[in-house]
Image: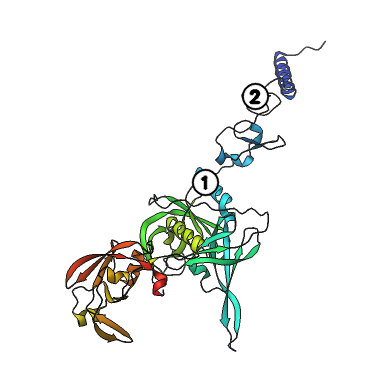
Amino acid sequence: MRVYSRRQLVFFSVLSGLIVLALGFGLGLFRLPGVSSGEGVPDGSAGTGEAAAGEAVDEGGLVEPIPRQLSQSPRPVNALNMTDLLPYSEDERENISIYERYNAAVVNITTEVVAINWFLEPVPQDGGSGSGSIIDTKGYVLTNNHVIENASKVYINLVDGSQFEGSVVGTDSENDIAVLKFDPPQGQELQTIPFGSSDNLKVGQKVLAIGNPFAFERTLTVGIVSGLGRPIQTSQQNIIRDMIQTDASINPGNSGGPLLDTQGRMIGINTMIYSPSGGSVGIGFAIPVNTAKRVVAEILQYGKVRRGRIDATVVQLFPALVRYANLPVSQGLLVSRTRRSGQAERAGLRQGTEAVRYRSTVIYLGGDIITSVDGMKTDTYADLFSALEDNKPGERVKVEVIRGGRPLTLDVTLVDQEELGN
């Protein structure tokens, strides 16, 4: 008979214990804490036929985990993904999650324009490109007006490489916004980007931009809100109020793409950059989403944005005119003419009476000088358009004027800008 040492006996005892434990788990004799035997679902749901919190049951009875961002309930142990264990920081996981959820809702917009060749024949050629956001599953896309301006054809390119010809539903040059439409194939489900709000933004708040800079499709950049309430003048000499300034890298091709908050909601439309060199220097501007929501609603309902205007011809003051007419102020809008029996005339706005010629223009001197409209200072034409940007025909606004060197306030009813031919 073989004699074993004490150390060998301890080794065999431990080994046999491990074998018993392994067999017990394999046969379901033992359970891990919180997991019912043989079922792989949390305690309290075993044998009931009901799904545990954090799971979805299809009609066939299969149990599938709901993504973590949609449910904070514990998930089954056997549903854990290896990606959950990867060494990403919380900030990185946030960026990755937003990009994976919404990059498919960002489209690349390309255009075709008509040019004239040496034989004075119209020929199509490639135009510009930019970005856009799918805002409705029916195929509506939100972008900048300057992305599709003067285009004879507009093409919308999706994340899967498919391309569709789009149509222009409506544009708003004053806010540099356009709404496009394409028809997705039957049964194709489009990812959309939800609207957020630009009311409660804070400087320092984290933001993300997705776009197609320099034709590099669906590029993600991250930054913060660098400033709020910026009045920025566009190339069309319009002033867009309350622009969002951001240091998220924005370059040519990003125009029209979404600026997102950390919930993946659109808070702005990336529109322009300040750049002495033509590249991003960390000063970009986005149209606030609240402006976009108002404009989109008008475009979808009327095909255009209806705005109220003062039915009078005004002249922006300039030094030569101020000196010649000996005007009491150096900045403002001189009322040259009012429309006969129009709303401005009825409100008491006074036109000029003395005609003088300046280059090819006839100016009537002696009228009121508008200095403020609807509470906003109006030194220039752009100021006037900006002041009335969100006013509708039929609304009454307070117009402050200088008459005979004295201030005066009038209540003027606005008319539709189409009545004035602009």
Q: Nearer the viewer, residue 304 or 93?
A: 304
- Give how far apart the Cα atoms at labels 2 and 1 are: 32 Å
Whether residue 331 sits left or right of residue 193 in the image: it is: left
Amino acid at dot 2: Leu
- Pointer 1: residues within 10 angstroms few (<14), some, or many (20+)? some
- Residue 32 numbered mark, or none: 2
- Considering only vertical position in the picture, is 10 above or below 212? above
Q: Quadrant of residue 315?
A: bottom left
Work out whether residue 248 can be spotted. no
Q: Quadrant of residue 31?
A: top right
- Considering only vertical position in the picture, is 351 above or below 284? below
Measuring from the top left, give residue 279's x and y in whole percent: 47, 67
On the image, numbered disc 1 is attached to which residue?
A: 94
Measuring from the top left, give residue 41's x and y in whole percent: 65, 29
Whether residue 179 sits left or right of residue 79 in the image: it is: left
Q: Nearer the viewer, residue 407 or 158?
A: 407
